[in-house]
Amino acid sequence: MVSLQELMAYLDELLEPQRFNDYCPNGLQVAGKPIVKKLVVGVSASQSLIDEAIRLKADAILVHHGYFWRGEDPRITGIKQQRIRKLLQHEISLIAYHLPLDAHPIYGNNVQLAKILDIDVEHSYDIERIPNLLWVGSLQHATPGSELAQKIGQILKREPLYLPGSDKLISKIAWCTGAAQDFIEQAASHGVDAYITGEVSERTFHFVQETGLHFYAAGHHATERYGVQALSEHLAHYFGITQQYVEIANPI
Ligand SMILES: [Zn+2]
């Protein structure tokens, strides 16, 4: 077991949230029991994840998408009240890391996505002064766009929305997990053949048509499953606590 205080000190040192001007507070968002033996892990702190954490007798929940987003109504009402009431009732802490968990060079969503898709990481770039947000690398073999779409679908267990580009095989590739469709122009500026992210917009189609870049919307949830899992496996090993990832299916 580990004290909540020690766990948070370790996470804040590892993930360096102070380097990020984020859209939400990073770290401990809701304080629960002072001791953590069991960690339940998921992508988003939805009611279903909380219910599962209660069932699994978790002391803390670790997520990528927590609460208190910039611009949202700060009052604790509606579904936010229901979620926080359950957490407090069961003394379950909510720990959330957003951008720091996208960017981390070992446990980050982007590095972990490259790992499962067999992409060799070459470089990461800052975007709007947010460190390591856009990643560039290469495939081991030049691959037709449709073949890469199939591979992404199989590995992430979710069919991507694929917008085909030019006839050129894909070898150099850029990616950013989540809702990063509007980094497509920065991605293209690095001379890549394809761009992978989670979500898509109407305007993405025209960009692809006019540049010949291949584009994959591989799922916001699906591309952001892997950082929290890598991190929690590390924490379990490091502190001798138990952890369990809970997949709450989300088609977006
Ligand atoms: Zn996200």
Image (tube, helix red, strand yellow):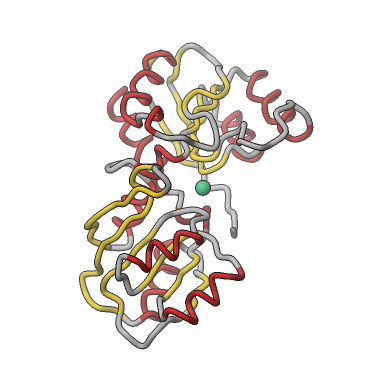
Q: Nearer the viewer, residue 175 or 209?
A: 209
Q: On the rendered structure, is 191 left or right of 198? A: left
Q: On the rendered structure, is 51 left or right of 215? A: right
Tell me where residue 172 appears, x and y as whole percent: 27, 70
Residue name at image x 55 percent, y 65 percent:
200
Q: On the rendered structure, is 172 left or right of 76? A: left
Tell me where residue 31 appears, x and y as whole percent: 55, 17
Location of the C terminus by quadrant is bottom right
Residue name at image x 60 percent, y 31 percent:
55
Q: Is residue 191 above or below residue 102?
A: below
Q: Is residue 207 above or below residue 157?
A: below
Q: Nearer the viewer, residue 229 or 9?
A: 9
Q: Nearer the viewer, residue 201 or 140?
A: 201
Tell me where residue 21 appears, x and y as whole percent: 46, 35
Location of the N terminus by quadrant is top left
Question: What is the number of callouts on the image?
Answer: 0
Residue name at image x 28 percent, y 26 percent:
238
